[in-house]
Image (spheres, rainbow, N blue to C red):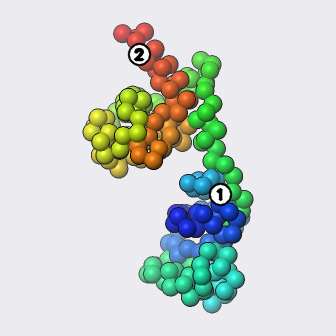
């Protein structure tokens, strides 16, 4: 579930508290959360809705100027059921605190290494996680399109893989490109040390 920039700003300041979507299958669930560029958004409820029950006040709560504007947007999709999503509190992105937490014990670092190994095992690209950490450490702030070839990946695959590392608190997105977080730098040093001892 994605929000345009203007709706994200409304969510951030607390004036957008409702959303409507047309889905074949809901992409969020009641009681769940959604990571957005402005924080982690709680989802209070997800319910089917008939268009004729959507009010002008509902449209304003969803960030639209009018009910007609909202209905026009919902009708642009040809398939799926209409849903009303009640939005809950917005909390800080937990990955921000995580990436500032530098794993200091061998146990924590071993667990992170195991998580990387599981990510490696799920793809046909081999051990991409270590290569990607090395590239981001050496080339902070460089565009994905200029980095993907260094790890033998297409641009979209590279960006997806960097997001997987971000979910572990190991990378940070910049205005252009990425960099390793403090947590990522500590882990990379640990992995380099292990690799040197193995040779």
Q: Secondary structure at mark 2?
A: helix
Instruction: Name the quadrant containing residue 84.
Output: bottom right
Q: Position of residue 33 (x, y in %)?
A: 64, 56
Q: Position of residue 167 (x, y in %)?
A: 54, 42
Q: CA distance from mark 1 to mark 2?
A: 40 Å
Q: Position of residue 153 (x, y in %)?
A: 30, 41
Q: Residue at x 53, y 23 (%)?
A: 186
Placement of the C terminus among the 4 image quadrants: top left
Q: Residue at x 53, y 33 (%)?
A: 181
Instruction: Name the quadrant containing residue 109.
Output: top right
**Residue closest to the eye, 48 or 60:** 60
Q: Above or below — where is 103 with respect to 76?
A: above
1 and 2 marks in contact (CB < 8 Å): no
- Observer able to see residue 85: no
Q: Secondary structure at mark 1?
A: strand
- Observer able to see residue 143: yes
Q: Above or below — where is 71 with respect to 100?
A: below
Q: Position of residue 31 (x, y in %)?
A: 70, 59
| Residue at mark 1 | 41
Q: Residue at x 69, y 52 (%)?
A: 91
Q: Above or below — where is 46 with respect to 102?
A: below
Q: Residue at x 59, y 18 (%)?
A: 106
| Residue at mark 2 | 195
Q: Above or below — where is 75 with respect to 198?
A: below
Assess disc 2: are there few (<14), some (14-19) or many (≥20) residues with their C-alpha within 10 Å of its C-alpha: few
Residue at the bottom extreme, as displayed = 52
């Amino acid at each position: 579930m994605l929000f345009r920039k203007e709706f994200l700003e409304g969510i951030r300041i607390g004036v957008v508290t409702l959303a409507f979507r047309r889905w074949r299958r809901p992409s969020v669930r009641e009681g769940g959360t959604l990571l957005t560029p402005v924080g982690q958004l709680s989802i209070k409820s997800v319910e089917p809705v008939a268009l004729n029950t959507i009010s002008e006040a509902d449209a304003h709560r969803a960030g639209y100027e009018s009910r007609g504007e909202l209905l026009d947007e919902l009708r642009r999709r040809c398939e799926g059921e209409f849903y009303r999503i009640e939005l809950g509190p917005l909390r800080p992105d937990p990955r921000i605190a995580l990436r500032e937490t530098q794993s200091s014990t061998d146990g924590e670092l071993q667990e992170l290494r195991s998580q990387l190994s599981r990510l490696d095992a799920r793809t046909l690209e081999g051990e991409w996680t270590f290569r990607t950490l090395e590239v981001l450490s050496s080339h902070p702030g460089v565009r994905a399109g200029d980095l993907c070839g260094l790890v033998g990946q297409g641009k979209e695959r590279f960006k997806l893989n960097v997001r997987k590392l971000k979910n572990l608190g190991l990378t940070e997105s910049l205005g252009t490109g990425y960099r390793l977080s403090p947590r990522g730098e500590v882990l990379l040093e640990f992995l380099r040390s292990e690799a040197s001892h193995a040779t």
